[in-house]
Amino acid sequence: MLAILLVLNGPNLNLLGTREPEIYGHLTLEQINGQLKGLADELGLELEFFQSNHEGELVDRIHQAVSNVKGILINPGAFTHYSFAIRDALSAVNIPCVEVHLSNIHAREEFRKQSVIAPVCLGQVSGFGALSYLLGLRALADEVY
Ligand code: DQA
């Protein structure tokens, strides 16, 4: 059976493509997910995708992951910087996790420099646009096998 990895996206990432393209690029979330699917096929992994603008829905999806998911690739969006609930959910399920960002959060406003999620992840990939997701998926796949 193929290992299942969960790709989670937080608030406002449903607007990719039109949202501040000079920062986040021109690709839609659907296009990024398509690229991830291509890589997953190559690596022999199955992906599930979930995006929500609501913290509690992301927490619920993380809890559900316990039943079948071997790894989580997450762009928590603005929740990166203050969601202790998402951090605690990731800690609680203890599923290997990689955090990704389109923009380089360390080169932007002060409030973006801190991630409360990163300490419970294997690592963080930030600043490479859609490539951050692909690099993150490779790293996660390496960990899962
Ligand atoms: C982001 C960076 C966050 O600071 C921001 O709130 C986002 C997107 C990124 O992918 O660069 O929504 O996570």
Image (tube, rainbow, N blue to C red):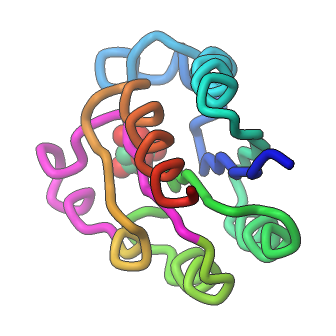
Residue at the image position 54 percent from the left and 53 percent from the top: 74
Residue at the image position 59 percent from the left and 75 percent from the top: 86
Give residue 128's position: percent from left, percent from top: 28, 29
Residue 56 can be seen, yes or no: yes
Quadrant location of the C terminus? bottom right
In the image, residue 21 lies in the stretch drawn in magenta: no
Q: Is residue 120 left or right of residue 112?
A: right
Q: Is residue 71 above or below residue 27?
A: below
Residue at the image position 62 percent from the left and 60 percent from the top: 71
Q: Is residue 19 above or below residue 137?
A: above
Q: Is residue 123 left or right of residue 8?
A: left
Give residue 132's position: percent from left, percent from top: 37, 35
Residue 15 can be seen, yes or no: no
Give residue 58's position: percent from left, percent from top: 72, 63
In the image, residue 103 lies in the stretch drawn in magenta: yes
Residue at the image position 49 percent from the left and 23 percent from the top: 19
Taking depth in this image into account, of 38 and 144 the one nearest to the observer is 144
Give residue 13's position: percent from left, percent from top: 58, 36
* The residue stretch that appears in magenta: 96-115
Taking depth in this image into account, of 7 and 28 the one nearest to the observer is 7
Q: Which image quarter has ligand 1?
A: top left
Q: Quadrant of residue 85?
A: bottom right
